[in-house]
Amino acid sequence: MAETLGSLVDKLSIKNLRIWHLDEALENAEASKRQELQAKRDLADSQRQDLMKEVDGFLGAALRGEVRIRDKKIKMYTNTNVSSSDAIKELGNAVSELACRNIKLWHLEDEVRRTDLPDATIVQTKRKIDATNQERNDLMDKVDEILSTARHQRDAGPNEQ
Protein backbone atom coordinates (compact mmCIF):
# COMPACT_ATOMS: atom_id res chain seq x y z
CA MET A 1 0.00 0.00 0.00
CA ALA A 2 1.32 3.42 -0.91
CA GLU A 3 1.82 6.18 1.61
CA THR A 4 -1.06 8.54 2.27
CA LEU A 5 -1.12 11.89 4.02
CA GLY A 6 -2.61 10.14 7.05
CA SER A 7 0.19 7.57 7.23
CA LEU A 8 2.87 10.24 6.74
CA VAL A 9 1.40 12.46 9.46
CA ASP A 10 1.23 9.41 11.71
CA LYS A 11 4.92 8.68 11.15
CA LEU A 12 5.81 12.33 11.70
CA SER A 13 3.96 12.49 15.02
CA ILE A 14 5.73 9.33 16.20
CA LYS A 15 9.09 10.74 15.11
CA ASN A 16 8.35 13.93 17.08
CA LEU A 17 7.54 11.83 20.15
CA ARG A 18 10.81 9.95 19.77
CA ILE A 19 12.75 13.24 19.52
CA TRP A 20 10.97 14.62 22.58
CA HIS A 21 11.90 11.51 24.61
CA LEU A 22 15.49 11.65 23.35
CA ASP A 23 15.72 15.32 24.37
CA GLU A 24 14.42 14.36 27.81
CA ALA A 25 16.97 11.55 28.06
CA LEU A 26 19.76 13.91 26.98
CA GLU A 27 18.89 16.36 29.76
CA ASN A 28 19.24 13.62 32.37
CA ALA A 29 22.05 11.58 30.81
CA GLU A 30 25.41 10.83 32.32
CA ALA A 31 28.34 12.22 30.35
CA SER A 32 29.26 8.73 29.06
CA LYS A 33 25.83 8.31 27.40
CA ARG A 34 25.41 11.80 25.93
CA GLN A 35 27.31 11.19 22.67
CA GLU A 36 25.29 8.04 21.85
CA LEU A 37 22.00 9.76 22.69
CA GLN A 38 22.93 12.84 20.69
CA ALA A 39 23.73 10.68 17.65
CA LYS A 40 20.30 9.02 17.96
CA ARG A 41 18.65 12.41 18.35
CA ASP A 42 20.45 13.78 15.28
CA LEU A 43 19.40 10.76 13.22
CA ALA A 44 15.78 11.09 14.38
CA ASP A 45 15.80 14.80 13.50
CA SER A 46 17.21 14.06 10.03
CA GLN A 47 14.46 11.49 9.52
CA ARG A 48 11.88 14.03 10.73
CA GLN A 49 13.16 16.59 8.22
CA ASP A 50 12.86 13.99 5.45
CA LEU A 51 9.31 13.14 6.54
CA MET A 52 8.31 16.81 6.52
CA LYS A 53 9.59 17.12 2.95
CA GLU A 54 7.70 13.95 2.03
CA VAL A 55 4.48 15.38 3.54
CA ASP A 56 4.93 18.60 1.56
CA GLY A 57 5.64 16.68 -1.64
CA PHE A 58 2.71 14.34 -1.16
CA LEU A 59 0.31 17.18 -0.43
CA GLY A 60 1.37 19.06 -3.57
CA ALA A 61 1.11 15.94 -5.72
CA ALA A 62 -2.29 15.09 -4.22
CA LEU A 63 -3.68 18.54 -4.92
CA ARG A 64 -2.42 18.31 -8.51
CA GLY A 65 -4.16 14.92 -8.87
CA GLU A 66 -0.88 13.05 -9.40
CA VAL A 67 -1.28 10.51 -6.57
CA ARG A 68 -4.12 8.53 -5.07
CA ILE A 69 -5.18 10.18 -1.83
CA ARG A 70 -7.04 7.21 -0.33
CA ASP A 71 -6.89 3.47 -0.61
CA LYS A 72 -9.98 1.35 -0.15
CA LYS A 73 -9.94 -0.24 3.28
CA ILE A 74 -11.02 -3.72 4.23
CA LYS A 75 -11.80 -3.69 7.94
CA MET A 76 -11.63 -7.10 9.57
CA TYR A 77 -12.57 -5.94 13.04
CA THR A 78 -15.48 -4.29 14.77
CA ASN A 79 -14.40 -2.94 18.10
CA THR A 80 -17.24 -0.89 19.56
CA ASN A 81 -15.07 0.39 22.42
CA VAL A 82 -13.42 3.11 20.35
CA SER A 83 -14.11 6.79 19.89
CA SER A 84 -15.68 7.67 16.58
CA SER A 85 -13.92 10.11 14.26
CA ASP A 86 -17.14 10.87 12.36
CA ALA A 87 -17.56 14.34 13.91
CA ILE A 88 -14.08 15.48 12.81
CA LYS A 89 -14.34 17.65 9.69
CA GLU A 90 -11.19 19.81 9.75
CA LEU A 91 -7.73 18.57 8.77
CA GLY A 92 -6.00 20.29 11.70
CA ASN A 93 -8.33 18.64 14.18
CA ALA A 94 -7.78 15.20 12.61
CA VAL A 95 -3.98 15.66 12.69
CA SER A 96 -4.11 16.84 16.31
CA GLU A 97 -6.27 13.89 17.38
CA LEU A 98 -3.95 11.48 15.54
CA ALA A 99 -0.94 12.92 17.38
CA CYS A 100 -2.81 12.55 20.70
CA ARG A 101 -3.55 8.88 19.98
CA ASN A 102 0.14 8.29 19.28
CA ILE A 103 1.05 9.90 22.60
CA LYS A 104 -1.49 7.68 24.36
CA LEU A 105 -0.17 4.57 22.58
CA TRP A 106 3.42 5.45 23.49
CA HIS A 107 2.52 5.63 27.18
CA LEU A 108 0.33 2.51 27.11
CA GLU A 109 3.18 0.57 25.48
CA ASP A 110 5.57 1.81 28.18
CA GLU A 111 3.07 0.73 30.82
CA VAL A 112 2.63 -2.79 29.44
CA ARG A 113 6.42 -3.33 29.39
CA ARG A 114 6.64 -2.90 33.14
CA THR A 115 7.69 -6.12 34.84
CA ASP A 116 5.97 -5.36 38.15
CA LEU A 117 2.40 -5.51 36.80
CA PRO A 118 0.05 -8.43 37.39
CA ASP A 119 -1.10 -10.34 34.31
CA ALA A 120 -4.66 -9.02 34.63
CA THR A 121 -3.42 -5.43 34.38
CA ILE A 122 -1.31 -6.29 31.35
CA VAL A 123 -4.37 -7.82 29.63
CA GLN A 124 -6.45 -4.71 30.38
CA THR A 125 -3.69 -2.45 29.06
CA LYS A 126 -3.31 -4.56 25.91
CA ARG A 127 -7.04 -4.13 25.26
CA LYS A 128 -6.62 -0.37 25.64
CA ILE A 129 -3.74 -0.55 23.16
CA ASP A 130 -5.95 -2.43 20.68
CA ALA A 131 -8.75 0.14 20.94
CA THR A 132 -6.38 3.12 20.76
CA ASN A 133 -4.60 1.63 17.75
CA GLN A 134 -7.95 1.23 15.96
CA GLU A 135 -8.74 4.89 16.74
CA ARG A 136 -5.30 5.81 15.36
CA ASN A 137 -5.99 3.94 12.13
CA ASP A 138 -9.44 5.51 11.85
CA LEU A 139 -7.86 8.95 12.27
CA MET A 140 -5.27 8.26 9.55
CA ASP A 141 -8.22 7.37 7.29
CA LYS A 142 -10.00 10.56 8.39
CA VAL A 143 -7.00 12.70 7.37
CA ASP A 144 -7.09 11.09 3.93
CA GLU A 145 -10.88 11.49 3.68
CA ILE A 146 -10.70 15.21 4.51
CA LEU A 147 -7.95 15.78 1.93
CA SER A 148 -9.87 13.80 -0.68
CA THR A 149 -13.04 15.79 -0.04
CA ALA A 150 -11.15 19.08 -0.26
CA ARG A 151 -9.56 18.12 -3.58
CA HIS A 152 -12.90 17.00 -5.05
CA GLN A 153 -14.56 20.23 -3.95
CA ARG A 154 -11.74 22.25 -5.49
CA ASP A 155 -11.85 20.26 -8.73
CA ALA A 156 -15.64 20.59 -8.94
CA GLY A 157 -15.37 24.37 -8.91
CA PRO A 158 -17.74 26.82 -7.25
CA ASN A 159 -20.68 26.11 -9.61
CA GLU A 160 -20.75 22.35 -9.00
CA GLN A 161 -20.46 22.21 -5.20
Image (cartoon, rainbow, N blue to C red):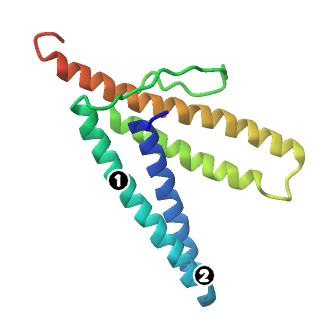
Horizontally, residue 39 falls left or right of residue 115, namely left
- State the image quarter where residue 32 is shown: bottom right
Q: Residues within 10 Å of mark 2 (few under 14, many from 20)?
A: some
Horizontally, residue 116 falls left or right of residue 136, namely right
**Circle on res. 23:** none
Which secondary structure, mark 2? loop
Name the residue rendered at 47%, 44% in the picture: 10
Q: Position of residue 131 (x, y in %)?
A: 65, 33
Given the image, on which type of amino acid does mark 2 rest? Answer: Ala
Given the image, on which type of amino acid does mark 1 rest? Answer: Met
Vertical side of 129 occupied by 54: above or below:
below
Name the residue rendered at 43%, 44% in the picture: 8
Vertical side of 56 occupied by 139: above or below:
above
Horizontally, residue 9 falls left or right of residue 66, namely right
Vertical side of 46 occupied by 92: above or below:
above
**Circle on res. 52:** 1
- Pointer 1 with pointer 2, Cβ within 8 A: no
Name the residue rendered at 52%, 29% in the picture: 138
State the residue position of label 2: 29
Q: Position of residue 95 (x, y in %)?
A: 41, 40
Residue 119 in view: yes
Q: Residues within 10 Å of mark 1 (few under 14, many from 20)?
A: some
The mark that comes first in sequence, 1 or 2, is 2
Name the residue rendered at 41%, 65% in the picture: 46
Which residue occupies the extreme top position in the image? 160
Vertical side of 43 occupied by 82: above or below:
above
Which secondary structure, mark 1? helix
